[in-house]
Image (cartoon, rainbow, N blue to C red):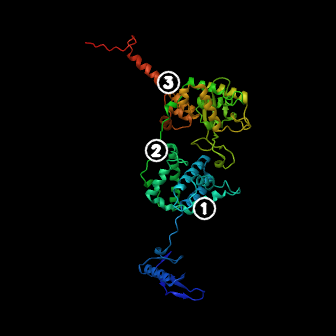
Amino acid sequence: MKSQDVRVWEIRRNKSSKRPSYEVRWKVAGKPFSKTFRTKALADSYRAGLVKASRAGEGFDTETGLPGSLVEAAPSLTWYEFALKYLAMKWPHAAPNSRDSMNETLTLVSTVLVGKKPGRPADAVLRKALRGWAFVHGSNEGKEEPPAKVSNALAWVAKASLPLADLKNPAVMRSVLNALTLKLDGTPAAPETVRRKRAVLSNVLRYAVEIGELSENPVASVQWKPPKLAKEVDRRVVINPVQARELLTALSYVGLYKRARGRRMVALFACMYYGGLRPAEAVGLRIQDCELPEKGWGRFILHKTRPTVGKRWTGTGKVHDHRGLKNRSEDEVRPVPVPPQLVRIVRKHVAEFGTAEDGRLFFNERGGVIGSSSYSRTWEEARALALTPEQVASPLAGTPYDLRHAALSSWLNAGVDPAEVAERAGNSVDVLLTRYAKCLDGRQHVANQRIEALWDDGSGTEDTSETD
């Protein structure tokens, strides 16, 4: 509540303490206030401010006794203080992969938003301290103390970190955005990675606006364009059905005399190619989610995925997350029709290897979840067996995810309605047509033959004679 009923008294000297002090006294709406200063000059200056505000007709707050012109602004949080505050708010409700992205972005920005205080740690130590300790919320509580180098590095960051308000300076904001184009090791980041980190930073700064630390999001005030993101799948990665069969056959020979490593994964990769499943969806597939008749089409009822994210981000001490389908609510399911070829492959796999304790179709020798590094390494070995040296050196089926690209492209090229393909794939039609409407490998050669046939006069040479 504001009041203009203000009375300011003369300064009173306090002689009771060993060192004399000076007290400014005033009253607002009958309520007394006072403030003590060590020197008379400071007291005179403060009293003059009260008198000036009163004569100007300012309203004095009846709780604090101060006019708006004398209210001390709260010191701005440093970037590092704010980043820790944001992390504590966001971490408990974030998915493991989101935690990883958040940690990476906060670490990168924090290495940029520091002043020039002496004693800056080596870059490797600074990254380790921020990424491994400061921005991993709760993971080190109750555990060992951080190494001395880490503690010293974090103490330096706390002192050297620039004020959050500095981001309102376009030059500072631009330097942060430019830093997003690099990985933590200083090498260029992929366009998709830059886009993801920019989205995280924008979300962080929206929170600063929400709690009143910033008046507006400074990201929007800078004319900065991220690297162009390729929205379409590279057609060179898409394999044709013959190549797919050769790759699946080659898988059965990988590690043939050592735990049948490749043979255990034939059906896993077949689910990606014949069913269009994402790798994490295939890894999490359980026998109770499958309808596998002896003849004809079957069906998968997908509802869980098992992406590899790392112990640091799951919060459970396990490497794999256990979550719902991408872009769907936690309990939503997606039925996927299964062609007879895949039904036979999965039935054969179950007959040979059985299932894990929880019903998972695909598991390692110890019954654990198959990690992305494990199936990616096996896939590289299968490519070397099935493809020519030129194809191995090319992007053709370079990653397991390219099997899904091939599946969706094949369905579209076969004339399947895009809405049906999108439903099976778990995408929107817009995303599907933007990313997956690709031709099969070798399709251009077929088109060239058909065009050439239009011009062929039967002699095997082009007719270039003139006619009257």
Among the two numbered marks 1 and 2 on one chain, the one whose residue lies closer to the N terminus: 1
- Residue 291 falls left or right of residue 50: right
| Mark 3 / mark 1, whichever is N-terminal | 1
Could you say which disc has been placed on residue 155 in the image?
A: 1
Measuring 63% from the left and 48% from the top, which residue is drawn there? 313
Residue at point 57%, 51% (across, down)? 102
Place of residue 390 in the rendered image (x, y in percent of width and height, measured from the top left): 53, 27
Say what amino acid the circle numbered 3 marks. Answer: Gly
Q: Which residue is mark 3?
A: 442
Query: Which amino acid type is shown beneath numbered disc 2?
Result: Pro
How far from the left and from the top, in percent, is residue 4? 46, 79
Viewer-nearest of labels 1 and 2?
Answer: 1
Q: Residue 297, labelled with which disc?
A: none
Q: Give the residue type at disc 1.
A: Ala
Q: Is residue 271 visible?
A: no
Place residue 455 in its image quadrant: top left
Mark 1 neighbour class, 10 Å CA radius: few under 14, some 14 to 19, many 20 or more: few
Q: CA distance from mark 3 to mark 1?
A: 59 Å
Say which element carries label 2: loop
171 left or right, relative to 76: left
Mark 2 packing: few (<14 Cα in 10 Å), some, or many (20+)? Answer: some
**Element type at marker 1?**
helix
Q: Earlier in the sequence, mark 2 or mark 3?
A: 2
State which quadrant residue 352 falls in: top right
From the image, tell me which residue sits under label 2.
Answer: 227
Label 1 – label 2 distance at C-alpha: 35 Å
Spatial separation of the CA atoms under disc 2 and disc 3: 31 Å
Q: Position of residue 24 (x, y in %)?
A: 52, 83
For discs 3 and 1, the disc positioned in front in the rendered view: 1
